[in-house]
Amino acid sequence: QSALTQPASVSGSPGQSITISCTGSSNDIGTYNYVSWHQQHPGKAPKLLIYEVTKRPSGVTNRFSGSKSANMASLTISGLQAEDEAEYYCSSYTTSSTYVFGPGTKVTVL
Amino acid sequence: QVQLVESGGGVVQPGNSLRLSCAASGFTFSSYAMQWVRQAPGKGLEWVSVISYDGNNQYYADSVKGRFTISRDQAKKTLSLQMNSLRVEDTALYYCVRDDDMDVWGQGATVTVSS
């Protein structure tokens, strides 16, 4: 059960757009459209932002969008805001019927 | 409202056991797969286990396979995680999570394994 790969940190200025990558393999992202993205603020439980690669739960702003190509998924945050400063985790379903998370990406708003 | 409340955390010595519970409310519990995800202090999220909506299928991370058992009581709307042969590296905040999409998270139960 290998973890997914994410950059340790990404930063941007308010109003800018940033993209966080999440690289897996043919055992997870490459086979299934079950990629999710979660946001976690310090001391808080994670919050679902994106599921099934591109879908947003009710109540999540459309500034967050997801995509996938081959073994890599991406989360784009548009119109970056101070409140977006948090840790972001990708996850995927795998061919072993298990799930796997990425190590997390810390987003800093400059 | 939809809510998941974990309980049963605590401090245990290595090799001992602990049982976590998660009380679900505000939704049809028996219609959703349920999961456990943990987070060691200062670390990232680690998937632990999933159980199907009907309880017939369970899957585990390699790190806990053979030591942890996930189960559910549909009548009591409760998810459980029986943790045996606990190790220091099992120390973490354990989250109860709804569905394959992980759309609802509890606030977590703290498990500390220390001698």
Image (cartoon, coloured by chain):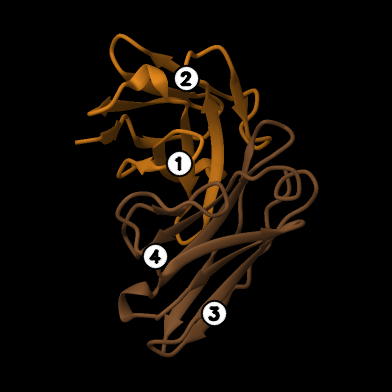
Chain colours: A brown, B orange
Q: Do tags 1 and 4 sit on the same chain?
A: no
Measure the alpha-carbon separation of dots 2 and 1: 13 Å
Alpha carbon of mark 4 to alpha carbon of mark 2: how far? 30 Å
Task: Return the residue found at the far right.
Answer: A26
Q: Quadrant of residue A109?
A: bottom left
Residue where numbered disc 2 is placed: B53
In the image, residue B21 above or below residue B61: above
Q: Chain ID for label 4?
A: A
Image coords of residue B31 (percent x, y): 40, 20
Q: Quadrant of the N terminus of chain A?
A: top right
Badge 3: how crowded within 10 Å, few (<14), some, or many (20+)?
Answer: some
Q: Residue shown at 62%/30% (left/top)?
A: B60
The amino acid pointed to by label 3 is: Val
Chain hosting mark 3: A
Quadrant for the C terminus of chain A, please.
bottom left
| Three-letter code, disc 4 | Asn
- Which one is closest to the eye, mark 3 or mark 2? 2
Q: Which residue is mark 4?
A: A62
Q: Which residue is mark 1?
A: B102
Q: Secondary structure at mark 2?
A: loop
Q: Are marks 3 and 1 in contact (CB under 8 Å)?
A: no
Q: Earlier in the sequence, mark 3 or mark 4?
A: 3
